[in-house]
Amino acid sequence: MKFGGTSVGTPQRMKEVAKLVTRKNEPVFVVLSAMSGTTNSLVEISDYLYKKNPDGANEVINNLERKYMKHLDELYAKDESKAVMTEFLREEFQYLRSFTKELFTSFEEKSIVAQGEMISTNMMVNYMKEQGINAVLLNALDFMRTDKNAEPDPVYIKEKLQTLMEKTVEENGKEPMVYITQGFICRNAYGEIDNLQRGGSDYTASLIGAAINAQEIQIWTDIDGMHNNDPRVVDNTQPVHQLQFEEAAELAYFGAKILHPTCVQPAKYAGIPVRLLNTMEPEAEGTTISNATEYGKIKAVAAKDNITAIKIKSSRMLLATGFLRKVFEIFESYQTPIDMVCTSEVGVSMSIDNSAHLGEIMDELKKYGTVTVDTSMCIICVVGDLDWSNIGFETRVMEAMKDIPVRMISYGGSNYNISFLIKEEDKKRALQSLSDTLFK
Ligand code: ADP
Ligand code: ASP
Ligand code: MG
């Protein structure tokens, strides 16, 4: 069971999580995010320190400390737990303050942003113990690890976790009811503190689910499952009850924030269903992500912002071989992944979401032809069982997009999506029209 930032966002919410975790009286492995807003504050502290502004950093640290100290009064009933946690928080905030005197690099930043999850898990395990729950905290830094390519190392994670859990049973005399650990944080191949990217607690949950061969992986958040459109943009979106792993991965990658895109793969490989559930409404059905396909059904729409489109036109491409390789190699040399690709006989259009090296990429592309760039674009992705033998879905999607200027269209790369590249300013209109046409 993974609980996101909002789900542990206040002491009251933490109390409800403790109830949820123990309501079935079955052993569970719990992964927690930092309390909502905390990771952002830790990033803010780091930004001040990069800019050599210790006063700015100290102000954020002091505000955060005051907020957390108040939480203790609300969360714990016993003076003893309050005292233990007051001491814990004092040390935590002293640790954060120690960085204001040091040379600041990304190594220090990683240590700072890891503290949100350290605090939330310590608060939770102590609350559970106060409630008489047999709960044990495992430190994610002792088993969650990435390799030299910054990819999680599933063999190491599984072995380490197994050893730690066996040791716990030995020390505890029996299997604890609840294991708790931090989402998001890990160590890298060099043993340094690192993380699985913003929103990466979902990934932690799925890696652990696979490592312990869990019955299912539950992602508890603030909404009742994956909705058929972005609820932040479109009114009256509805939860989708069933998604195939690939469908969920496409939606997550193309902007459905409820799920981190990396979360799907470990679960899919291990064949473990993922359920998206609402902490505020635990009885709601939510979304089950599994191998089950619903034949011919369009499931949902998502949108990814901040996209740049690049077109290169060259008469040299006509009947030539190796042109695409040359173009793609340029993107590869700047570590810039390409999302969408459309080709014609004399040109190729691509979209990227990381424009950090756009200038250099353009300079190199210009050696091969005329380059055009469109910024502030957005990818709209329609997801479902869209195998090419199912007829009619293209017409329905095109009908919805009939009033929207479209820069690129992509279909056929997978059986699960059709994507459109449009201007960001047309996003709301496009999403609304797709909801009206596809889901009414
Ligand atoms: P957590 O902190 O629990 O990880 P997130 O904020 O990462 O939660 O994800 C939940 C949010 O995702 C929801 O509050 C919702 O606004 C947003 N969201 C975006 N697209 C979708 C979608 N298609 N379905 C459900 N939620 C979505
Ligand atoms: N706390 C981290 C973040 O805010 C990780 C997570 O919540 O998944 O990005
Ligand atoms: Mg999230």
Image (cartoon, rainbow, N blue to C red):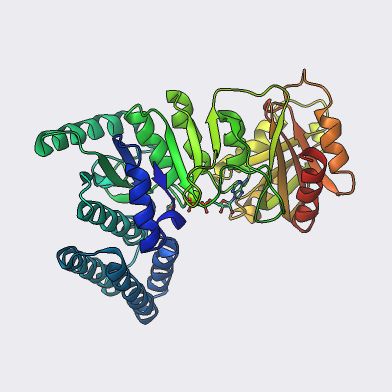
Is 382 located above or below residue 273 in the figure? below
Is 109 located above or below residue 415 in the figure? below
> From where the camera sits, is residue 239 visible?
yes
Q: Is residue 291 left or right of residue 369?
A: left
Q: How many marks?
A: 0
In percent of the image, x 30 and y 64: which residue is there?
75
The x and y percentages for residue 404 are 86, 49
In percent of the image, x 29 and y 46: which residue is there?
181
The x and y percentages for residue 400 are 84, 42
In percent of the image, x 44 and y 43: which residue is there?
202
Residue 28 falls in image quadrant: top left
In the rendered image, the residue lying farthest to the bottom is: 55
51 and 291: which one is in front? 291
253 and 19: which one is in front? 19
The x and y percentages for residue 232 are 65, 56
In the rendered image, the residue lying farthest to the top is: 389
Q: Is residue 413 left or right of residue 117?
A: right
